[in-house]
């Protein structure tokens, strides 16, 4: 009797375990993503249909707006409640959640995805700086070059080589501005614009000018300790070059009131010759508006050209961001691993990134993409581009950089508020705050006198270049006027002839 009961209980438990396993296997694997390109949920669901066919496991995609993503993800990872099985994380978010042990270490099976498949600039974002533990797998790359309107460049006879240096880029902007071309809707075409105060992309927009001129946001000392590097000669040089677009009236101050989406819309409407933006715009110009693309917009007609960041003393250095895939630390579904591996397979990377417009992270897929001229330019830029430093404190530091550069733009926007002394005070204040976040003593900070001397030299050089460029612009404008004056006599003769013909016709009718 006892043996019978024992067998019955054992069979019941086994049945319950089996049914629980079957139930769990039939539950959808959830994926959290952000708005990657147009219709991101639909496009990912299309790829995941293949996963379900292959494994029999259903999936569910949820899109989090970037504005809410940080708070939603932080709460889910901290508590484990309603957390997804796989989630997209911005590359700079990885170190923070990894340092809190809220995403799973992947070292036990990471060789199954073959790390050598991925470009190094992406793989470097999978872990904390100085740590060998891998917490994520690269999914796609956000590289930000100069995007140019081909039609506008052609009309002004501006080539890609003309834009290779900062001076060449400035000259091109002046030429476009001087033309004062007005479109059918009344909008005036400008050379360049970028978002200003309080836009979360502000540090990304300063980055290429700082990095290309040998500067950095933070730097390691001889003991390997991170500290603020804003008040260094190279960093200030890059900052001054970027500020000069506003100070020298190359970019209108009104642009500083706009956000990234609004500036992108101006470019899409062919109101701007240049922007520095995400590469997804290139792909969107090849997709019709009914599918979330831009092929039937003005920029789709004019076409986009990808141009490297103008070379500085350290070369041409683009900002590189992107997103990785991770698994919450409290997740217990072993199928999550299979889903993550599926999403980063070459075939799926190729298909998904083609739909959203960002670059894949696989070397093999990138080699295939390089057959396209515009994407070849983007891929070449990966070799010299940079990502932010992969440290847990970066999220907090980035907010400080947003605040610092917003304060700078507030001064620059209103001339009566701008002074070099105030600029120094802003840089010094945030240098101290950044060092505090990094637990670093703020010693040997550049003095105001040293700053004024350096800033004066940087701006003296720019003033000389600006004077030459302004003279060239005035010459160009005078040439336009002279051409019009040369045409005036001919136009006058034609008008007289037409008037005579009209009067003669009226008399003959009478």
Image (cartoon, rainbow, N blue to C red):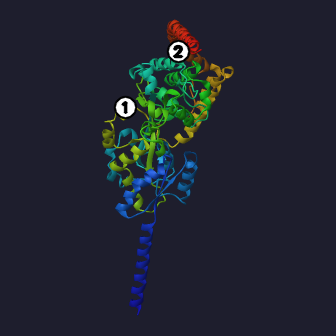
Return the residue nearer the eye: 87 or 356. 356
Location of residue 235 in the rendering, given as x and y in whole percent from the top left corner: 51, 25
Between marks 1 and 2 in the image, the one whose residue lies nearer the viewer: 1
Location of residue 185 in the rendering, given as x and y in whole percent from the top left corner: 57, 29
Residue at the spot of label 2: 462
Report if residue 499 is visible in the image.
yes
Which quadrant holds the C terminus? Answer: top right
Report if residue 312 is visible in the image.
no
Q: Residue at x 47, y 53 (%)?
A: 103
The reply to whether discs 1 and 2 touch (Cβ–Cβ < 8 Å) is no
Quarter residue 409 falls in: top right
Quarter residue 78 falls in: bottom right
Query: Vertically, is 305 above or below 141?
Result: above
User: Helix or strand or loop: what does disc 2 sit on?
Assistant: helix
Q: Residue at x 63, y 29 (%)?
A: 407
Q: Report the disc number at residue 377.
A: 1
Which quadrant holds the N terminus? Answer: bottom left
Q: Residue furthest front?
A: 510
């Amino acid at each position: 009797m006892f043996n019978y009961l024992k067998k019955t209980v054992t069979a019941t438990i086994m049945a319950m375990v089996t049914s629980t396993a079957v139930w769990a296997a039939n539950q959808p694997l959830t994926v959290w993503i952000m708005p990657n390109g147009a219709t991101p949920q639909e496009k990912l669901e299309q790829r995941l249909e293949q996963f379900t066919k292959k494994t029999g496991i259903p999936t569910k995609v949820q899109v989090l707006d970037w504005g809410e993503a940080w708070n939603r993800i932080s709460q889910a990872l901290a508590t484990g409640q309603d957390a997804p099985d796989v989630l997209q994380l911005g590359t700079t978010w990885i170190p923070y959640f990894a340092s809190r042990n809220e995403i799973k270490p992947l070292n036990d099976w990471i060789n199954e995805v073959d790390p050598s498949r991925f470009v190094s600039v992406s793989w470097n974002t999978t872990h904390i700086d100085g740590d060998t533990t891998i917490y994520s797998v690269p999914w796609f790359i956000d590289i930000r070059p100069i995007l140019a309107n081909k039609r506008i460049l052609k009309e002004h006879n501006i080539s890609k080589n003309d834009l290779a240096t900062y001076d060449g880029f400035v000259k091109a902007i002046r030429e476009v501005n001087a033309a004062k071309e007005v479109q059918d809707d009344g909008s005036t075409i400008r050379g360049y614009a970028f978002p200003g105060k309080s836009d979360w992309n502000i540090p990304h927009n300063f980055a290429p000018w700082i990095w290309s001129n040998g500067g950095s946001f933070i730097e390691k000392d001889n003991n390997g300790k991170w500290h603020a590097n804003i008040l260094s000669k190279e960093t200030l040089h890059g900052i001054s070059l970027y500020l000069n677009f506003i100070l020298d009236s190359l970019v209108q101050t009104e642009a500083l009131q706009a956000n990234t989406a609004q500036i992108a819309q101006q470019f899409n409407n062919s109101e701007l010759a240049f922007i520095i933006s995400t590469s997804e715009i290139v792909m969107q110009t090849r997709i019709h508006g009914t599918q979330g693309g831009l092929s039937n917009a003005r920029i789709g007609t004019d076409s986009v050209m990808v141009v490297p960041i103008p070379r500085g003393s350290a070369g041409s250095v683009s900002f590189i961001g992107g997103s990785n895939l991770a698994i919450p630390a409290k997740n217990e579904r072993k199928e999550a691993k299979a889903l993550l591996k599926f999403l980063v397979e070459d075939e799926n990377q190729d298909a998904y990134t083609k739909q959203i417009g960002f670059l894949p992270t696989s070397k093999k897929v990138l080699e295939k993409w390089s057959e396209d001229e515009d994407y070849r330019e983007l891929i070449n830029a990966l070799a010299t581009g940079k990502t932010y430093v992969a440290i847990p404190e970066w999220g907090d530091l980035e907010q400080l950089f947003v605040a610092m550069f917003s304060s700078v733009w507030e001064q620059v926007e209103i001339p009566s508020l701008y002074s070099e002394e105030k600029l120094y005070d802003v840089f010094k204040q945030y240098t101290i705050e950044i060092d505090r976040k990094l637990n670093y003593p703020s010693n040997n900070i550049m003095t105001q006198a040293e700053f004024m001397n350096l800033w004066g030299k940087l701006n003296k050089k720019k003033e000389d270049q600006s004077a030459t460029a302004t003279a060239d612009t005035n010459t160009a404008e005078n040439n336009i006027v002279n051409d019009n004056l040369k045409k005036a006599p001919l136009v006058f003769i034609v008008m007289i002839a037409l008037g005579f013909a009209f009067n003669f016709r009226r008399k003959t009718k009478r």
